[in-house]
Image (cartoon, rainbow, N blue to C red):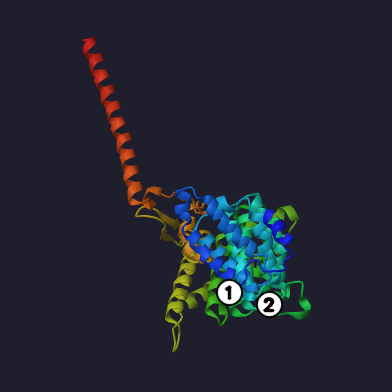
Amino acid sequence: MGKSKKSKARGGGDDLLDSSDADSVGSSSTALSDLSISYATEHVNSQEFVLDKYIDALYEKRGSTRETALAKLVDAFESFMLHGLVENKYATLLSQFNNSVKKGSTREVYLASRAIGLLAITLGAGSSSHEIMEESLPQLCRVLQAWSDASKMISALDCLAVITFVGATDLAETELSLKAMWDVIHPKSGSNVGTVRKPKPPVLAAAISAWTFLLTTIGSWRINTDSWKEPIAFLSTLLGAEDRAVRMAAGEALALCFELNLLDVSSYEDDDVNTGGTGGSKNKLFLDMQALKAKISGLASNLSAEAGGKGADKKNLTDQRDLFRRILDFVKYGECPEESVKIAGKRDVLRVSSWSELIQLNFLKRFLGKGFLKHVQENGLLQDIFDIKVDTTETLSSNDKKIFRSEEEKERALKLNKERRLAQARKNAAMLDE
């Protein structure tokens, strides 16, 4: 927060980084590239100085200077675990990130949105991430409601999904973000009914993916099952969309709905009892859901065997066939999807075996990009999400491994010596008894 006062005292007149100093922001990134060495040699203060320099650059009027600083910060968040450096600066960072979302260029909004999401992931679940969600939600929703260019909307959707995933503490908070995303997916159901807009395919696919990722968190909360018929029916129509990415995103969303039993009428029984629902309404709901199930299964079957045709993108077509085969196997036979990712040496593998886990894995891999493995290895949040324990010896240097092994050998030798002494003592005692 001290940086905020410092920059304001300058009055914002002369740029902190003029054309020559702007290069120093870029050259300072080499210091962050040595971050792991700095931690090892306890030179954290120098890295904090570099971080402060980037924060100062975020106050500048020149957009290109702010973009440069944001790009370097995003790269640092992806490449290193910065928890120790940012836990006492997150409020200052967040304030400037949100300012960039509010009034920056398309690229600045994209970078700032990524930075906000990465900041939340770095800090992990808790009061700080909850504050990030509360402070950022209004700005991100304004981007979505303004129907600005596709890049801004996609980055805002991804950011909103991540900060709610990490920071939300109850169902009501999650539902706010789910609704903001659904208003992009199905605009006529939103508040701006007078001017219905149709999202472009990339935006629609991103909105469905973000909505689905966030939906994975509601499994442990009681939900109003009666409200799911319309969304599921609309998602089923998107299986016939022209854009393959939209079809695949809708397919994953529907697979998750099956896994969460949102199409299972038996899960409505308690609601009927509690709300005084009639048998007739329940029977109609049952028939409607059965028809939806049949429709979705039929469409999934067709998409799992879709012919390529001339000029078709073979890789994307193969991905689509594979996805819908897995969906069909799950719907028909209850066979859950399985996937594994090597996360460290030979022994550490991240395994998922449900649609919820697979959707979380794929979304976080895409959002973290090159930083995914680093965060899985060192970030407690991701280790808790996927219930993994990393064998840190696999990531040690050869010298550190030698030290580690020598310590292991010492412990093993001490244990053997102790066992020998105990065995000798027992033998001596037996001889005395005789």
**Circle 2 is placed at which residue position?**
148
The answer to whether residue 357 is seen in the rendering is yes
Q: Quadrant of the C terminus?
A: top left
Q: Nearer the viewer, mark 2 or mark 1?
A: 2
Q: Quadrant of the N terminus?
A: bottom right
Q: Horizontal placement of 428 versus 183: left or right?
A: left
The picture quadrant where one finds residue 237 is bottom right
Q: Position of residue 408 (x, y in %)?
A: 33, 39
Label 2, label 1: how far apart the Cα atoms are: 16 Å
Number of other residues with Cα within 10 Å of mark 1, as a class: few under 14, some 14 to 19, many 20 or more: many
Q: Amino acid at mark 2?
A: Ser
Q: Which mark is residue 316?
A: none
**Circle 1 is placed at which residue position?**
205
Q: Residue at x 74, y 64 (%)?
A: 11
Secondary element type, mark 2: loop
> Is residue 345 depicted above or below 254 in this figure?
above
